Image (cartoon, helix red, strand yellow):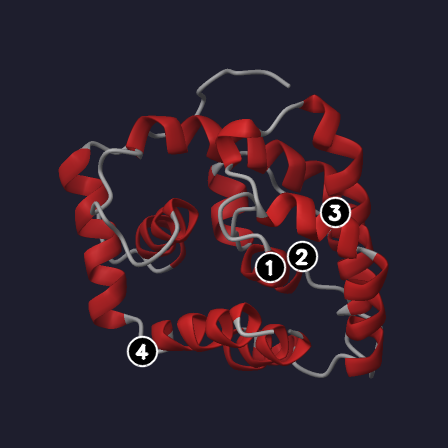
């Protein structure tokens, strides 16, 4: 499981590839209960009772994936990891996307903006749920990230 | 949490164009599925 997360982060977010593998293992073990729960859910079921759990999960991963050489933390890496583990419930983002959705963050304090982003993604998912292929080989949240990345991160579409 | 929509909502064509372009131009895309497979198999 850790290898899957590690592979994605090392290839997608290479500036933050130098995290401690053992810290990530411990992070997943410590959060196994929340991860198992969220893995079974879709974002449409998100409600305020989840806020503290998501916040705790996000902060654990923020610490677990910090860069070894300078302890810098990456909210982008965190979203990549937790989305991979809970693909229908926790969305992907990057700094460009966060800004457009008015969820700008400072890395050490990114959990609250991420929760806000989750609620916005829930609203967006409801609007675009019929726009993705059906059946699809990936989650709706992955499709939303592909759209967001093309439009806001890369400017590939206008 | 507020349920205000204060961001752009794409129509069908724009959304479809976005994810299609991603899958044409983003060369690292397959890594996501390889990673997902590793997790699913563990």
The residue at 19%/46% (across/down) is B16
Closer to the camera in the image, A70 or A141: A141
Residue placed under numbered mark 3 in the picture: A34
Name the chain under label 1. Answer: A
| Proximity of marks 3 and 4: CB atoms separated by less than 8 Å | no
* Crowd around label 4: few <14 · some 14–19 · many ≥20 (10 Å): few
Question: For the residue labelled by badge 3, is the local secondary structure a helix, a strand or a loop?
Answer: helix
Q: CA distance from mark 3 to mark 4?
A: 32 Å
Q: Which of label 1 and label 2 is nearer to you?
A: 1
Say which of A128 and A38 sits in front. Answer: A38
Relative to A69, A100 lies left or right: left
Chain letter, disc 4 residue: B
Q: SS at mark 1? A: helix
Q: Dividing the image into 4 quarters, which one contains the N terminus of chain A? A: bottom right
Disc 2 versus disc 4: distance between alpha carbons?
Answer: 22 Å
Chain of the residue that carries numbered disc 2 in the rendered image: A
* Residue B17 at x, y percent in the picture: 17, 50
Nearer the camera: disc 2 or disc 3: 3
Q: Residue at x 82, y 45 (%)?
A: A56
Of circles 4 and 1, the one toward us is: 1
Q: Quadrant of residue A131?
A: top left
SS for callout 2: helix
Instruction: Look at the numbered disc 4 and give the secondary structure of its residue.
Output: loop
Q: Dot 3, how many residues are within 10 Å of its Cα: few (below 14), some (14-19), or many (20+)?
A: some
Q: Is residue A24 above or below residue A104?
A: below
In which image quadrant can residue A5 be found? bottom right
Q: Which residue is mark 1?
A: A85
Q: Which residue is mark 2?
A: A75
Task: Provide residue A57's location: percent of width, then percent of height.
Answer: 77, 50
Q: Are marks 1 and 3 in contact (CB under 8 Å)?
A: no
Gap between marks 1 and 2, in whole Å?
15 Å
């Amino acid at each position: 499981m850790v290898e899957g997360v590690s592979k994605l982060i090392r290839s997608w977010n290479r500036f933050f590839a130098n995290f401690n593998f053992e810290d990530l293992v411990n992070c997943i073990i410590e959060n196994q209960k929340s991860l198992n729960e969220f893995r079974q859910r879709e974002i449409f079921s998100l409600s305020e009772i989840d806020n503290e759990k998501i916040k705790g999960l996000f902060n654990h991963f923020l610490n677990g994936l910090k860069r070894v050489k300078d302890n810098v933390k990456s909210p982008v890496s965190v979203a990549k990891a937790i989305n991979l583990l809970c693909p229908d419930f926790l969305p992907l983002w990057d700094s460009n996307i966060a800004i457009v959705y008015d969820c700008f963050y400072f890395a050490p304090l990114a959990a609250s903006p991420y929760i806000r982003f989750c609620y916005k993604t829930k609203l967006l998912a409801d609007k675009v749920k019929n726009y993705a292929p059906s059946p699809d080989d990936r989650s709706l949240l992955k499709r939303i990230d592909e759209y967001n990345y093309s439009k806001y991160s890369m400017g590939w579409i206008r | 949490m507020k349920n205000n929509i204060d961001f752009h909502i794409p129509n069908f064509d724009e959304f479809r164009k976005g994810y299609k372009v991603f899958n044409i131009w983003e060369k690292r895309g397959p890594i996501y599925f390889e990673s997902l497979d590793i997790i699913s198999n563990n």
